[in-house]
């Protein structure tokens, strides 16, 4: 066991001390925060943009001049000047553009021109089109005798409040969307970490093999202990990175929202009534349960896949030889991820979802999503139990392959060969 | 006699190939034991069995008189033929890692690492990563990782391959120094002539079978052929009736060399007299085959 510990601490320390790890770990959340900050900044700047487009407007019918004032990002100046004099105005850069609405009846509005030296962007163009469109729509409505106000009253959006009835009779406002999103986020993290760190285990085993360090190692450590030390060492690296990311993200988020707290609350993108409900639903999530399950499936999934990837690293002579084995490993994970997105946003209790959350190869990704909703305890137990059992079996299988593969050189290994190795004695 | 290591009928079979076929040998403590044979003879397999990397299919391995267990590997230092170190790790961390893996307490490991680095002039490089070192320096580091836990038995697979002559000599001296301190050294080589002078004992393996083993003096003496080397100033033709010249040549200095096979009834002194009567004798000595020649005789002539 002492040897496992020495291997583990080497794997851990040599990785955590690496510059790339430190940079990724610290810079990661900062970059993400910066990214979101940028988006927010750009969005808020766009909204409050005061650099309006000054546009000359010639409206033959006179029906728009008064109403066009409200179009965001534009300022209109009605004119009746001739085309030539307008052109001169534009060339002199007194105005940025010229909107010419030539004919106007309720059927046609295709004779609208916009002239400018610097044409507006697609977003601005769409804005202009939409406002003209809605004006035309309103005009047509009133022409046919329907009042705009009447129409608006017909279009009240319906929002279903989902209330979860607890065993104790309490009712909690649970927003299915919030739960799904939270669960999906966790599933995505697990998916990414299994891939990232599983492959790291494989590479590291492979590197030791091609370096022949492994010969010195196995002369003092049992291959099985070597494998365990490596897998758990790298698991600790993953956890370290994850925890630092969490801490940094949360504190950065707190920092950002304290800076822009006011703007977040007055943000008009969410309906005024939606925001408290969203928060309430968020805080009503079973955090403790989800956290514990996340940790369990995070580790379980990683250990399952990493032990197999370790065996593959040991069996292969070169990294390119690992490709043929990577495919069948990638498939269940990707499949699980697809199911996870369905579970999160459509039906958390479909038959496919239930089975995928019990089968150990997809469970780590699928079950965490379902854990955001309510999962019958027997399904939970079955899923966890089968994951633990499969993991133990996998470690045994991988240990066998690992031990045989490590000292086997110059042989291209296939599935059949791997299977044979299971039955070798020392 | 107590042997530090004994192999008894050790056999190892890989799928299609028998790597070792009933090999038995005994290594006396404090010896420098050369495991000689061409590439693919089974040397590496034998070394791996000895330090418990693989287990034999049948046969027994005894260490210090009792059945060897995995624990014994901690008393051995193994340097594989294909050298390997963690490229991204510093020399210092590397030495401590391997020492601790072999069960050396951290404080001792530090002290020993320092003294070894000093001894091999590597101290200024302690903080460097292995990938920054020259090949020769990395080899020296590799050697330290092999001996830092003060093994009783040092196992070196082709120790001099890849060393430049200066470093090879340095490592040779270190090996002999360790041997003086009582360490038993077992190494393999396919270049028999180069290691002959270092070994006190040898064994020859060929096509997974042990051809012969024992102390180098005994082995060579047992291969005496009653041939004598004669160097003369003039061409020499033997007048003795019961002796025959087996080969003749002119050496670089213009002297004449010949090898004379004595037959029944002939004595070395009679040969010397014969030479001196007709010629000027420059050198006379008994010809004893080198290990390499013994090996060739075995493989080609089918002695055994």
Image: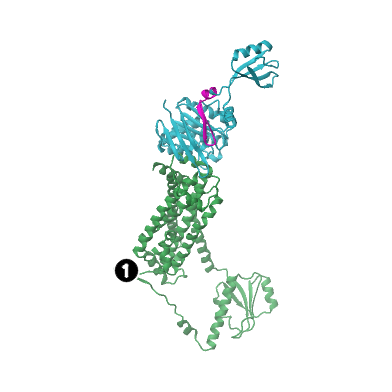
The green-coloured chain is labelled: A
Tell me how the rendering is colored: by chain
Residue B122, above or below A340 = above
Q: Secondary structure at mark 1?
A: loop
Hue of chain B? cyan
Q: Which quadrant of the rendered structure holds the N terminus of chain A?
A: top left
Looking at the rendering, which quadrant does residue B131 occupy? top right
Q: Is residue A388 magenta?
A: no
Pinpoint the chain carrying mark 1: A
Near-viewer residue (B199 or A155): B199
Q: Quadrant of the C terminus of chain A?
A: top left
- Residue A57 vs residue A147: left or right? right
Please name the residue shown 65% across and 12% down the image. B274
Number of dots carrying numbers: 1
Residue B46 at x, y percent in the picture: 49, 36
Task: Give left or right: position of B190 versus B24.
Answer: right
């Amino acid at each position: 066991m002492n040897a496992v510990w020495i291997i583990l601490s080497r794997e851990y320390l040599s990785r955590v001390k690496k510059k790339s790890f430190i940079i990724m770990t610290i810079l990661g959340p900062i970059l993400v925060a910066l990214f979101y900050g940028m988006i927010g900044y750009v969005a808020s700047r766009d909204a409050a943009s005061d650099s309006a487009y000054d546009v000359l407007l010639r409206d033959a019918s006179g029906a728009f001049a008064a109403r066009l004032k409200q179009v965001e990002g534009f300022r209109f100046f009605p004119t009746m000047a001739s085309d030539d004099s307008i052109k001169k105005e534009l060339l002199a850069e007194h105005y940025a553009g010229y909107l010419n609405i030539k004919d106007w009846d309720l059927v046609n509005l295709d004779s609208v021109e916009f002239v400018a030296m610097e044409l507006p962007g697609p977003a601005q163009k769409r804005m202009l089109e939409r406002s003209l469109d809605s004006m035309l729509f309103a005009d047509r409505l009133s022409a046919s005798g329907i009042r705009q106000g009447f129409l608006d009253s017909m279009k009240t959006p319906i929002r279903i409040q989902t209330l979860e009835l607890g065993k104790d009779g309490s009712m909690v406002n649970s927003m299915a969307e919030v739960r799904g999103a939270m669960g999906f986020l966790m599933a995505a993290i697990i998916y990414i970490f299994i891939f990232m760190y599983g492959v790291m285990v494989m590479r590291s085993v492979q590197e030791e093999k091609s370096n022949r360090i492994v010969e010195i190692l196995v002369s003092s450590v049992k291959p099985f202990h070597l494998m365990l030390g490596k897998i758990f060492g790298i698991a600790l690296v993953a956890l370290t990175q994850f925890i630092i990311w969490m801490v940094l993200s949360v504190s950065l988020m707190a920092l950002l929202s304290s800076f822009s707290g006011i703007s977040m609350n007055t943000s008009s993108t969410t309906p005024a009534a939606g925001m408290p409900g969203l928060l309430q639903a968020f805080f009503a999530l079973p955090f403790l349960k989800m956290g514990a399950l996340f940790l369990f499936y995070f580790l379980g999934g990683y250990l399952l896949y990493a032990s197999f990837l370790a065996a593959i690293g040991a069996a292969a002579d070169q990294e390119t030889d690992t490709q043929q084995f990577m495919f069948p490993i990638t498939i269940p994970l990707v499949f699980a991820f697809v199911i996870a997105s369905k579970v999160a946003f459509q039906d958390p209790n479909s038959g496919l979802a239930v089975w995928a959350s019990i089968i150990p190869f997809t469970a780590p990704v699928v079950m965490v999503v379902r854990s955001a909703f309510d999962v019958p305890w027997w399904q939970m137990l079955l899923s966890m139990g089968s994951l633990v059992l499969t993991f133990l079996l996998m470690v045994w299988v991988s240990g066998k392959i690992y031990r045989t593969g490590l000292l086997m050189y110059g042989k291209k290994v296939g599935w059949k060969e791997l299977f044979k190795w299971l039955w070798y004695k020392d | 006699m107590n042997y530090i290591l004994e192999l008894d009928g050790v056999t190892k079979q890989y799928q299609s190939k028998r790597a070792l076929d009933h090999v038995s040998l005994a290594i006396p403590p404090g010896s420098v034991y050369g495991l000689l044979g061409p590439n693919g003879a089974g040397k590496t397999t034998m070394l791996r069995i000895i330090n418990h990397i693989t287990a034999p299919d049948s046969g027994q391995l005894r260490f210090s008189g009792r059945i060897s267990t995995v624990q014994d590997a901690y008393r051995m230092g193994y340097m594989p033929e294909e050298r390997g170190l963690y490229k991204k790790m510093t020399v210092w961390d590397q030495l401590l890692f391997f020492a601790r893996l072999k069960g050396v307490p951290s404080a001792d490991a530090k002290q020993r690492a320092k003294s070894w680095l000093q001894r091999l002039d590597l101290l200024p490089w302690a903080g460097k990563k292995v990938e920054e070192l020259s090949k020769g320096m990395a080899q020296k580091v590799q050697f330290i990782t092999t001996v830092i836990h003060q093994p009783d038995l040092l196992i070196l697979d082709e120790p001099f391959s890849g060393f430049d002559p200066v470093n090879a000599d340095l490592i040779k001296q270190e090996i002999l120094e360790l041997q003086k301190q009582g360490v038993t050294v077992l190494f393999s080589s396919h270049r028999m002539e180069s290691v002959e002078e270092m070994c006190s004992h040898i064994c020859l393996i060929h096509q997974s079978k042990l051809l012969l083993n024992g102390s180098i003096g005994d082995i060579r003496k047992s291969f005496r052929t009653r041939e004598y080397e004669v160097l003369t100033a003039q061409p020499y033709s033997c007048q003795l009736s019961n002796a025959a010249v087996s080969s003749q040549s002119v050496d670089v200095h213009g002297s004449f060399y010949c090898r004379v096979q004595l037959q029944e009834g002939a004595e070395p002194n009679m040969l010397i007299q014969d030479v001196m009567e007709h010629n000027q004798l420059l050198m006379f000595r008994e010809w004893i085959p080198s290990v390499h020649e013994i090996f060739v005789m075995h493989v080609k002539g089918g002695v055994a």
